[in-house]
Image (cartoon, helix red, strand yellow):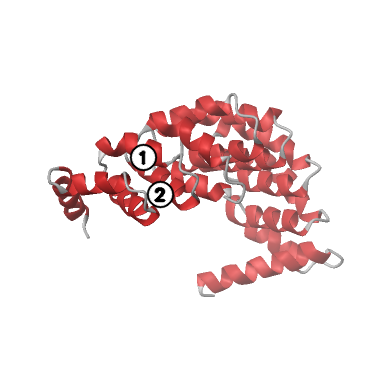
Amino acid sequence: MSGKDFERLASLINHTKVSDYIIKNLKSRNKNNIIFASFFAGTTKIEIAKPLLQKTIRIHNQQIFFSSSVALAQINAYDSLDLILHEFIKYNNFGNDYLLLILTEFDDIICDKIMKLLTVETSPSLATTFLRVLRYYKYQDAGQTVLRMLVYSHLKDVKIESLKFIEEIKFEKAAFAVSKLLEHKLPEIRSQAIKTISQLDNKSFEDKIFSKLFENDYDVQYQAALAILNHYEDGEKKLSELAYSINKGNSAAISRMLLSEKRVRDGK
């Protein structure tokens, strides 16, 4: 169905008794009826369904919660965000990917509300999900806030998600702070810091990244070699010189592998 066809269907539902039928099903005690009605209420943006969706979301059933939350998001019921979050935490077996799916059904105005929550939210899992939402929308206005989180948070996942966001929007003001994490004690953070710094168009840290080729952690070595090859002048030449060096272990092996992959891509 094309976009215009979908808009016509939505208009038809909103201006005929079909919307009454959907509202009736939202009032039903039958789970399947509620899920069915939630789907159509959301996809066709039946705004008069919002109070009922806010009611059904409180029914303690995972499927109803998810379908009702998605519908509220599609309707852009921003005032339902706190309710969605409050009900979400009741489900211990719901992964945060489900929350991400819900939040990204809102339009990008939700980012303003997410930003406010980030300043007070202490839950690491929610904070990382909020950062993923901002990254999904490439929300430029969050740059400074996320930079502060990168610097002051002691949580691994928050730091990594902050780095990914900075990389996504290419927030060059963060380059110096990111470079400090090239020496972080956790290899996961060092690895992501390499990926991020190489995307910020800052050539000042090339030597630092090259030195990471000789660390003990394989992923750090791999990301360093990839960054040198793809983002720095004479990167291919540098890896070629390293690839067949004696006593360079993984560094040489990784270099050979990446160079071989490049030749295949280039058809050489």
Rendered residue at 55%/74% (across/down):
264
Which mark, by number, is residue 110? none
Q: Which mark is residue 67?
A: 2
Q: Is residue 248 above or below residue 24?
A: below
Q: Amino acid at mark 1?
A: Leu
Label 1 to label 2, Cα distance in Å?
9 Å
Q: Nearer the viewer, residue 220 or 26?
A: 26
Q: Is residue 106 visible?
A: no
- Image quadrant holding the N terminus, namely bottom left
Instruction: Give the SS element for disc 1.
Output: helix
Q: Within the image, what quadrant is residue 81 found in?
A: top left
Q: Residue at x 74, y 33 (%)?
A: 154
Q: Amino acid at mark 2?
A: Ser
Give how far across and how far down residue 54 sits, in percent.
Answer: 39, 36
Q: Earlier in the sequence, mark 1 or mark 2?
A: 1
User: Where residue 178 appears, x then y in whole percent?
Assistant: 67, 36
Q: Which residue is nearer to you in this view: 37 or 158?
A: 37
User: Neighbour class for label 2 at 10 Å: few (<14), some, many (≥20)?
Assistant: many
Q: Is label 2 in a helix, a strand or a loop?
A: helix
The quarter of the image holding the C terminus is bottom right
Q: In this picture, is 62 found above or below 162?
A: below
| Residue occupied by mark 1 | 53
Q: Residue at x 36, y 44 (%)?
A: 71
Mark 1: few, some, or many residues within 10 Å (few <14, many ≥20)? many
- The picture quadrant where one finds residue 262 is bottom right
